[in-house]
């Protein structure tokens, strides 16, 4: 029985990895394609629109679609009510968003978005429906369907990107439409396979609704906090450096997205396992072993990507976008911190301690804003990357303090020492490369976690 929890976790990660890696690699390969076609200003507008949607979605829907996963796993006798409540809240949120866009059309509140209101609305609808369907699938433990939906979404995006940008030359509207169709068609697939319509009933359970909202609302702080941590730098860079520099800075996230892809895949399957194993025999040690192992895998991957940053940038970033490589090392370091914070998050969710989850992220994010304004004013867009890394570290630290009783056997000095090694490597890369020194640091990092290498290789092999 002891190995079953590892097998279950690895199996779910595998289903998501097959879809996500194949799909993300295809999207990744498209980066030089659309950086050749879109201007830095056009990409900057798209980036601001989509990151704004990521902020508004949890606020307008009270983030109930995330609570759907937790309650479907723990209240299996009420699936109709849980699925129905989630759908009602996303419907209300969509209506409010439509009114906000209508107001922007009339009063021109955000001139950058003028003329794109319909596309932005359709992006919101496709995104919120897809996220809701994914949370339902996760709650029913239908991980295989989530993987298939990811493949469908990406195939559609890749095909329509080529069609709209290279053949029909639609430009920025075509870029929007590509992602709308990708998410929308994947959402339809999940609605059909899960038979979500069958669960939608006109019934009320005010006690369950109260518990669902009470659980979900603090997660708004968590989502907003991560949004601020990952996106506020785009607004501050735009404000202090201009929309073109923001376009370059936004593209720099494409290399860290290689690492965050693994993080997001594992976090989704880890959320299910953390909830299932909570308070079972040996769960504290299970949590600790997985946190250390994932930190090792993500950390070494980060160091290798830092080492080859210029090589990858030369392939990915066309024309004026090449200078984005300078921001990559500290964004990669931020992803390592985020991965560890992402491991602790589901543990707090399993405890239903979403208040600690939300407040830690929001506090880190507010710190991010302060760091961003101060550092971008002094050293430009590089300051935004450093600020993002600092706040991600703070989020992990606050979460760990809240969950440390549930994690048995973590060595914080070793963890922090490993991260300091990565930080030194990032500085070396920015300061002229110094590749021999970087290789030495990678070896040091591996030796620091040599006792976790066996489990890490086993996870990767599986």
Image (cartoon, helix red, strand yellow):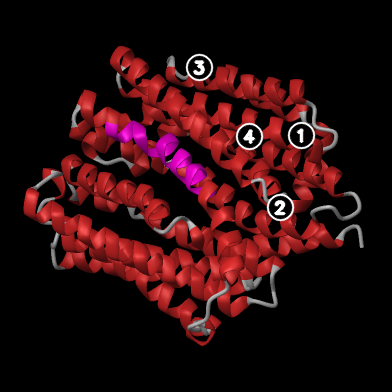
Residue hosting label 4: 299
Tag 2 or tag 4, which sits nearer the N-term? 4
Answer whether residue 352 is visible to the viewer in this image: yes
Tag 3 or tag 1, which sits nearer the N-term? 1
Q: Residue 12: x percent and y percent? A: 68, 64
Tag 2 or tag 3, which sits nearer the N-term? 2
Mark 2, Cα crowd under 10 Å, few <14 / some 14-19 / many 20+, is some
Measure the alpha-carbon separation of dots 1 and 3: 33 Å
Quadrant where the image shows the N terminus: bottom right
Measure the alpha-carbon separation of dots 4 and 1: 21 Å
Mark 4, Cα crowd under 10 Å, few <14 / some 14-19 / many 20+, is many
Of marks 4 and 2, the one in the foreground: 2
Q: Residue at x 39, y 57 (%)?
A: 27
Q: Residue 143: x percent and y percent? A: 62, 69
On the image, which quarter does residue 89 sit in? bottom left
With respect to residue 450, does 210 lie above or below?
A: below
Q: Which residues are magenta?
A: 219-235
Q: Residue at x 37, y 31 (%)?
A: 325
Tag 1 or tag 4, which sits nearer the N-term? 4
Q: Residue 404: x percent and y percent? A: 76, 34
Foreground residue among 49 and 202: 202
Residue hosting label 2: 350
Measure the alpha-carbon separation of dots 1 and 2: 14 Å
Tag 4 or tag 3, which sits nearer the N-term? 4
């Amino acid at each position: 029985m002891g190995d079953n929890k590892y097998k279950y976790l690895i199996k779910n990660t595998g289903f998501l990895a097959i879809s996500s890696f194949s799909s993300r690699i295809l999207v990744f390969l498209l980066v030089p394609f659309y950086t050749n076609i879109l201007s830095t200003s056009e990409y900057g507008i798209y980036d601001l629109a989509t990151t704004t949607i990521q902020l508004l979605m949890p606020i307008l829907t009270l983030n109930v679609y995330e609570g759907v996963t937790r309650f479907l796993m723990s209240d299996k006798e009420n699936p109709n009510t849980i699925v129905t409540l989630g759908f009602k809240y996303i419907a209300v949120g969509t209506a409010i968003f439509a009114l906000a866009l209508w107001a922007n059309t009339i009063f021109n509140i955000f001139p950058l978005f003028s003329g794109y209101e319909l596309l932005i609305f359709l992006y919101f609808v496709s995104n919120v429906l897809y996220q809701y369907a994914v949370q339902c699938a996760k709650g029913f433990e239908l991980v295989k369907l989530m993987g298939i939906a990811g493949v469908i979404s990406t195939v559609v995006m890749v095909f329509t990107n080529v069609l709209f940008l290279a053949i029909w030359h639609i430009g920025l509207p075509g870029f929007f439409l590509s992602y709308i169709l990708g998410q929308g068609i994947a959402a339809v697939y999940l609605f059909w396979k899960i038979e979500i319509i069958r669960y939608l009933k006109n019934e009320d359970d005010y006690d369950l609704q109260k518990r669902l909202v009470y659980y979900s609302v603090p997660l708004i702080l968590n989502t907003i906090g991560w949004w601020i941590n990952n996106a506020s730098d785009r607004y501050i860079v735009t404000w202090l450096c201009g929309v073109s520099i923001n376009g370059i800075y936004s593209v720099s996230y494409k290399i860290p997205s290689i690492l965050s892809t693994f993080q997001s895949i594992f976090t989704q399957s880890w959320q299910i396992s953390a909830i299932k194993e909570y308070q079972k025999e040996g769960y504290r040690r299970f949590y600790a072993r997985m946190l250390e192992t994932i930190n090792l895998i993500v950390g070494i991957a980060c160091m290798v990507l830092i080492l080859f940053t210029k090589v990858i940038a030369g392939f990915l970033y066309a024309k004026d976008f090449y200078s984005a490589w300078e921001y990559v090392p500290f964004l990669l370091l931020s992803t390592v911190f985020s991965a560890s914070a992402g491991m602790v998050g589901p543990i707090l969710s399993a405890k239903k301690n979403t208040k600690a989850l939300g407040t830690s992220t929001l506090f880190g994010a507010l710190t991010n804003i302060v760091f961003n304004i101060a550092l971008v004013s002094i050293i430009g867009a590089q300051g935004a990357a450093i600020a993002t890394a600092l706040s991600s570290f703070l989020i992990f630290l606050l979460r760990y303090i809240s969950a440390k009783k549930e994690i048995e056997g973590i060595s914080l000095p070793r963890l922090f020492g490993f991260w300091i090694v990565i930080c030194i490597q990032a500085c070396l890369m920015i300061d002229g490369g110094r590749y021999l020194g970087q290789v030495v640091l990678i070896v040091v990092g591996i030796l620091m976690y040599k006792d976790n290498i066996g489990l890490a290789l086993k996870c990767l092999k599986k």
